Image (spheres, rainbow, N blue to C red):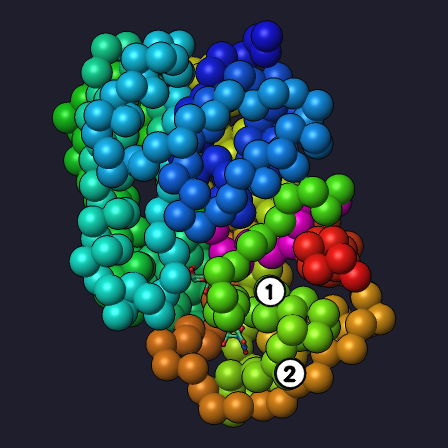
Amino acid sequence: MGTKGRILVTGATGYIGSHTTVELVNAGYEVIGIDNFSNSSPSMLEGMEKITGRKIPFIRTDCCDKAGMEEVFRKYPDIRASIHFAACKAVGESVREPVKYFRNNIVSLLNLLDLSMKGEGKGIVFSSSCTVYGEPDPENLPIKETAPVKPAVSPYGRTKQMNEEILMDCVRACPSLKVISLRYFNPIGAHPSALIGEMPNGEPQNLVPYITQTAAGLRKELRIWGNDYDTPDGTCIRDYIYVCDLAKAHVAAVGRLLDGRQENRFDIFNLGTGKGLSVLELVQNFIRATGADVPYRFAGRREGDIVKVWADPGKANSILGWKADTPIDEVLLSAWNWEKKVRGI
Ligand code: UFG
């Protein structure tokens, strides 16, 4: 038995959920993981169990299924807090299928809230995104939590903004509820064991999986979307954060919720490194760190892309006592090792 209490992890076999579950177990928490496997697979659970050497309690259910969620809370009355990862996250798909995004990302949170607002106080750590800032005004870079939330550029982004607003209203209505919203910048990489990692369905939309699949020979070449932006090398700038560092921030956030240190009942933290990297720099770093071959060419701009955004993680550094400090070469190597493992290279 862990000693620190039970945490419900929704989306536990997903990319960030699986890495976080591993860190929670390693930190001495009991977990109950749930997932509907809509964008993950049971093999992730095997990897998580190998890494931790523990059987991880898991229930296959959909957070939009109210009865299924009630069953989870009935079976595990000792749940003290939840980390809510389960959500759809593909920006392009959200433009084509907005109803799917609103239903999934809103209804799942409402179900979790209904159950979390009953009885004793519960905490929720919510997976948010830097997408809520839109294209930051240059004077707001690096971006702080106090920067304005801009109109969302996609239904996906809008669901994250709406989720945060819903959470704020529920905290106001329920004195026993505490919420920490974590705004992720660009999570990349995989666990150093290469037993869990990112598993995109079909053609990857995100940069690092596209790079690793190109290096593995699954894709002919990487297209860099735009090299005529107002940045030093003309390509977009992002704050790439190692998924294992990100996972540890969740452990810190849950710890604050459970031990009473978290005084604000609704709080927001940016999770990034504080350092912006251009797409071209990232590709060149990958080639240097791994020695792999990544054919690339410059192509036109991708619609809806933010030009530059990177975090001011100062609040998370000081209050959560957390810092993303894994060197980028190590992070990129972990992504490559995972791809090689998946492809049997
Ligand atoms: N890029 C390419 N070629 C590719 C893929 C990406 O050049 O094949 C570029 C993009 O144009 C962008 C950068 O790499 O400049 C990063 O793109 P990603 O798609 O990896 O990440 P985004 O910053 O666009 O989006 C991510 C998440 C979204 C989230 C957003 C803001 O994927 O879910 O951050 O939080 F909404």
| Callout 1 secondary element | helix
Residue 63 in picture, x, y percent from top left: 30, 35
The reply, left or right, for residue 297 in relation to residue 200 is right
Identity of the residue furthest to the left in this view: 173
According to the picture, the residue beneath numbered tag 1 turns out to be: 209
User: Is ligand 1 within 8 Å of the beta carbon of the residue shown at mark 2?
Assistant: no
The reply, left or right, for residue 89 in relation to residue 288 is left
Q: Residue at point 61% right, 20% down?
A: 55
Q: Is residue 11 placed above or below 140 in the rendered structure? A: above
Q: Depth-wise, is mark 1 or mark 2 nearer the camera?
A: 2
Q: Is residue 206 placed above or below 280 in the rendered structure? A: above
Q: Which residues are magenta?
A: 184-192
Q: Is residue 85 visible?
A: no
Q: Residue at point 35% right, 52% down?
A: 88
The quadrant of the rendering that contains the N terminus is top right
Q: Amino acid at mark 2?
A: Lys
The reply, left or right, for residue 235 in relation to residue 261 is right
Q: Is residue 119 visible?
A: yes
Mark found first going from the N terminus, 1 or 2: 1
User: Is ligand 1 within 8 Å of the beta carbon of the residue shown at mark 1?
Assistant: no
| Callout 2 secondary element | loop
Q: Disc 1 versus disc 2: distance between alpha carbons?
A: 14 Å
Does residue 284 belong to the magenta stretch?
Answer: no
Q: Quadrant of residue 150?
A: bottom left
Q: Quadrant of residue 75?
A: top left
According to the picture, the residue beneath numbered tag 2 turns out to be: 220
Residue 35 in picture, x, y percent from top left: 41, 36
Identity of the residue furthest to the right in this view: 291
How many other residues sit within 10 Å of disc 2, few (<14), some (14-19) or many (≥20)?
few
Q: Amino acid at mark 1?
A: Pro
